[in-house]
Amino acid sequence: LRTAAVIPAAGRGVRLGPGAPKALRTLGGLPILVHAVRAMARARAVSVIVVVAPPDGAAEVRALLDAHGLPETTDIKVVPGGPERQDSVRLGLAALPDDVDVVLVHDAARPLVPVETVEAVVDAVRGGAPAVVPGLPLADTVKSVDPDTGAVTGTPKRSLLRAVQTPQGFDRAVLAKAHSSVSGEVTDDAGMVEQLGVPVLVVPGHEEAFKVTRPLDLVLAEAVLARRRV
Ligand code: CTP
Ligand code: MG
């Protein structure tokens, strides 16, 4: 049985500002998506990758990936995504071959995740955890607020919090069940699995697995890449 990675790349990247869809913007001269696909393909366990392209951009993404000569040891499929990240992940899961039993879901917007982080997630799922997320302690103190008045309603103890990243790894059946039964506002796949009452394990994340969200993140990503190249 095989391990697959689903890469949601269908977002527009509104917070990054005007331009091409975020996954197609370049970093070190290559599309962000190409970095993300390579990061998954580098993990020895991953032999299938499903890229979820912008809804009207599957052909363009296919051509882009073919033009960048990706590893032949990995099957790469491209499917169109949907309006919300959750929809895109669901469409990606629907395209997985039958012989896949472990699934990673990895944001295209985290192009620089190190292979060690990917492999730590796969190993924990293969070791028996049904759901695994990479996470890091927070630098900032976090407060909950009343969005209407701005009044602080609480300060969760920082030492108990983790900022979670991707790839998030799952037993395929568990993730499929979560996507077919859970709805409502959820911002990650593990959050859906939690709603089923399935335990989720945090393993150490990595600073370089940060998400390219705002313009300053692109500056940081370029600097990380430049440092790797020296
Ligand atoms: N994503 C997706 N389908 C959507 C929305 C998001 O596949 N309908 C993907 C993005 O392409 C990205 C990942 O989910 O790789 C994480 O989302 P985010 O960082 O929020 O990216 P965008 O939604 O593109 O950015 P923004 O929210 O600023 O528009
Ligand atoms: Mg978004």
Image (cartoon, grey):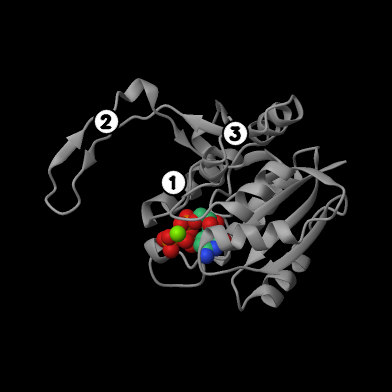
| Residue projecting furthest to the top | 159
Q: Classify the position of the N terminus by image quarter.
A: top right
| Within-10-Å neighbours for mark 3: few <14, some 14–19, many 20+ | some
Q: Secondary structure at mark 3?
A: loop
Nearer-N-terminus badge (1/3): 3
Q: CA distance from mark 2 to mark 3?
A: 28 Å
Where residue 102 sits in the image (x, y, percent)? 76, 41
To which residue does mark 1 refer?
Answer: 220
Residue 22 shows in this picture: no
**Residue found at x 38% / y 57%:** 215
Q: Amino acid at mark 3?
A: Val
In the displayed structure image, the side of residue 134 where residue 101 appears, left or right: right
To which residue does mark 3 refer?
Answer: 198
Using the rendered view, name the quadrant where residue 153 is placed: top left
| Residue 213 vs residue 77, the one in the foreground | 77
Q: Is residue 162 above or below residue 48?
A: above
To which residue does mark 2 refer?
Answer: 141
**Residue found at x 76% / y 68%:** 67
Q: CA distance from mark 1 to mark 3?
A: 35 Å
Nearer-N-terminus badge (2/3): 2
